[in-house]
Image (spheres, helix red, strand yellow):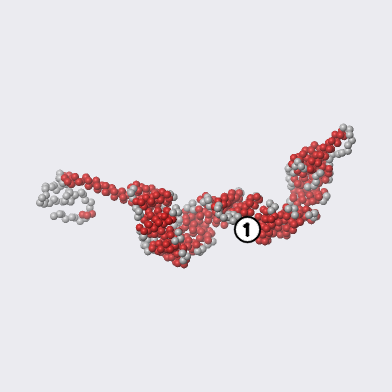
Amino acid sequence: MHARKPPGYRDRFHQFRDQRGRAADRGQVRIRAGDGFRSRRAHRRGGTVNRAFHRVLPALVVGGLLAAAAAVYALSSGDIIKQGVEAYRGGNYKRALELFTQALRLDPGGAKPHYFIGSALEKLGEPDSAMAEYQTAVRIDPKYVEALTGLGNLLRKQGKLEEGTAGLQEAVKYNPKDPPALYALGQAYLKDKKWDQALAVFRKGTLLKQGRALFLDGVALALEGKGEIKQAEEMFIRARETDPNNLRVRLDLGGFYERKKIPVLAAPEYVKAAELDPKNPEAHYLAGRALVAMNEFNAGLSSFMRAIEVDSTSAPAYLEAGRLYFRANRPQDAADKFRAYTGFKPDDPEGYIELGRALAKSPVPGDREEAIVVLEKANELLEKANEGAPSEGKPKNCEVVGALGKLYFDKRDNENALKYYDLYAQCADTLMTAEEHLRLGTLYVAVKDSAKAAPQLSRALEMDSTLARDANFQLGFLYFARQDHARAIPYFESALKADSTFMPALLNLGLAKLAVKESAAGVDILRRALAVNPKETRARVWIAQTLTALDSLPEAFEMYQSAIAQDSTNAEACRGAGVVLLLQKNWPEAVGYLERGVQLEPENLQGHVWLAQAYSNSGDISKAKIEFNKALDIDPNNKDASRGLELIRKYEQQKALKKSGATPSGAAPSAAKSGGGTP
């Protein structure tokens, strides 16, 4: 009989046993028939053991050690994977990858390490390497549902929709009750707009114990896709009630209300989502967008700034924050945000458009120049994006060309302004404001294109009567430039009805009156201009020129002198005063004024002619010849200068003959003989 086993026997670790299974150093040995002599002591105390067992013992020890080692290795690999999963959930994907790789070295034939390595690589932005790991995991274990799900999702992300969906279907086939696989397949059907199939999958998911709220959310999205809006809303609310703290459900319900254009219901869902996951930039961004739609601009800006704080690369948050700063008339702050956006999205023209608008409004010197460069970049990107698209003769980038036209117009770069405004008129004729019609008409006037100018200016007048002054003036100037002074006069008069002190209209109306021989009326209007602005030297000069033409020389000279007193650098006034003195035959004093005029404007041809005449009449023939030659250098075909030199040559010939004893009649050439005229 065997001895009774003591309590706790099975809970103890036992030594290796002999043939009868008793411990070698424990208990009395009972003698049975057929037994040989044995010691009651362990063999280490002088006893003996069976020789057969002695031969088997080394093999048992080695096998046991190997089995124990294998168990230790498997356990270590699993523990390391658990550590990697914790790092992965904490967002430390590099550390997770290191741990999963370490687990693979301990378990090179296992599928799990490959799957987890693929998950980490996908998060680190290495989809090709992740794909290889998923495929390896599936090759090792063709029914590995998690790996099939990861592979299917990644294939779809890479645009291989059918292949990816097939992988997800296979995962669900192997385990129809696996929540992640079932949810991923439903999401794939949603993205492919296969609403009925998505609905069927998500309804199956609602029967599972895990993830019911997410599957209800999926049912709602599928119903919305089918157009069953009321049922979809009810299902969204059920999903929220099932799990009020589910981030995905809150975001999807907020999106549902946003698509229905009910921001007052969308905002609370997004705000709650941001509370559930404060480190989620998308939740803060969406909350900000919904709040802005509710006209809660400050709260919206705060949400955008929190999104940027959480993720400094959140490009959409920078864009929307910049728009709010621009709306608040803070163009510099707006420009800072738009610059950041263009840094993250260098190929998106929207960022450059917004940045250009902000810079154009900035008070900082040089920002308007930068705005032109930025908007040119936006225009380039838009043209590149629209290559190959039917244009119908109209530019696609209407807003940009309009902004560029205005910037160049303000810069007085009429050539580029007209280039862009002309394009703008093609695409936005019915959308153009009265001010834009006026600007475009003004540009057409500058290039003397009356056929295009008149309709634009007339449209501006029709749209906004407050633009009557500028529009009428431009129409008048259009005819004035064509020297159709009679048709210009009514428009200048209409401009003055809108603003009786509008200096350009006063000056041009005065000149137009003079041109149609209404000298008295013209002078009166120019005197009105002087009364409006006593510092207006142009009016003084034009009045003086008119008085000169009317032979009112003393009054004309006085007006020229007042113009010079007002502006000593006015070359036209100096020349005019010199001509008056020339006509009064006051040669020496005329020389002084005319020399000053030539110094101020050495390229003025008529100034050299008049100065030469003054020198000639003063008897300084050598200087007269120099000035006539300077005039011919400017215009070799100038008749006044050629005639003046011819008279000087004749005078010199007569003088030479007189010296030689001949008695010809002659004198130095005078102003009347050598040509020239009043300014």
Quarter of the view holding residue 529: bottom right
Quarter of the view holding residue 628: top right
The residue lying at 79 percent from left, 38 percent from top is: 625
Q: Which residue type does callout 1 highlight?
A: Asp
Task: Between residue 607 and residue 451, name the one nearer to us.
Answer: 451
- Residue placed furthest toward the left: 33
Q: How far across and down, in percent of the image, does residue 469 sit?
A: 70, 58
Q: Which residue is mark 1?
A: 429
- Residue placed furthest toward the top: 660
The N terminus sits in image quarter: bottom left
Q: How far across and down, in percent of the image, does residue 178 sit?
A: 37, 59
**Residue 484 appears left or right of 53:** right
The residue lying at 20 percent from left, 49 percent from top is: 16
Query: Dot 1 lies on which element?
Result: loop
Residue 92 visible to an observer of this rendering = no
The residue lying at 21 percent from left, 49 percent from top is: 15
Count of numbered labels shown in the rendering? 1
Is disc 1 surrounded by few (<14), some (14 to 19) or many (20+) residues within 10 Å? Answer: some
